[in-house]
Image: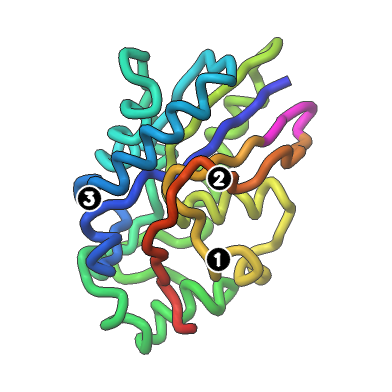
Amino acid sequence: MIYLYITRHGMTQWNEEGRLQGHGDSALTAQGIKDAEALAELMKQYPIDTIYSSPLTRAYQTACLVFPNRSILTDERLKEMSFGDYEGRYVSELLDLKDYDALWNHPEAFDRIPHGESYAEVYARLHSFLEDLHSLKGEHHIFMAIHGMLYVILMSIIKEVPIKELTTLNQSIIRGGALTIVSLKDHRYQLLKEAIDTHLDEAKTISYTKK
């Protein structure tokens, strides 16, 4: 049996400023650091043997704060979706653009933001990572520090939600430092706990879509 303990990176400067990140990066804020440290306390009850992180700084820093003095394995397949030419721009400037609207509200019709990734490309690299986990023998407890859109796509795989129904998952992005626990066995997933955030203080929420 494989157990996955999944979190999104902590709050960043660009999050607070309302900028789209993707493969772009910005540092964790004081709130992001505080939330990662709160998650570190929660994780002390779980027997984590392997720690994976996206190589992007915000996720790696989160993993390091949750597990200080532990070895962190970075994997390119856990990077956030690339938003190409829109990275670093204010979300408020993008809401009325056709391709940005399709990204969130019509995923089945979305191709890609210029110089960014398609959903198919992100699904392919995430499936590749998961296949590696499925091949493991015995019991493993694996922590993953990832990103908002990647979390949405991962949940769509676990919950067997087709791409045309991603809007049931992507209208609210998991808070940084929240914890989801999933078991894997015989290529089947079981969602054990989802988006636990009772260990976190209240914080500013971020919206990437029109309300």
Q: Earlier in the sequence, mark 1 or mark 2?
A: 1
Closer-to-camera residue (80/40): 40
Residue at 39% of width from left, 77% of height from top?
A: 100
Find residue 59 and report its image quarter.
top left
Disc 3 and disc 2: Cα gap in Å?
A: 27 Å
Residue highlighted by disc 2: 198
Left/right placement of residue 37 relative to residue 39 reads left
**Is residue 28 among the parts visible in the rendering?**
yes
The verdict on residue 186 being magenta is yes
Marks 3 and 2, the one that precedes in the sequence: 3
Q: Which residue is mark 1?
A: 170
Q: Looking at this view, is 41 or 21 the one in front?
A: 41
* Residue 184 % position (x, y): 72, 30
Q: Residue shown at 59%/44% (left/top)?
A: 196
Q: Amino acid at mark 1?
A: Asn
The single residue placed furthest to the front in the displayed view is: 201
Q: Which quarter of the figure has residue 181? A: top right
> Mark 3 — residue?
25
Asked which secondary structure carries label 1, the reply is loop
Q: Secondary structure at mark 2?
A: loop
Residue type marked 2? Thr
Q: Would you say 187 lies left or right of 180 here?
A: right
Magenta range is 182-187
Please provide percent x and percent y for residue 67.
39, 21
Q: Of 137 and 197, which appears nearest the observer?
A: 197
Which secondary structure, mark 3? Answer: loop
Q: Is residue 74 left or right of residue 178?
A: left
Instruction: State the residue at coordinates (76%, 38%).
Output: 190
Q: What amino acid is at disc 3?
A: Asp
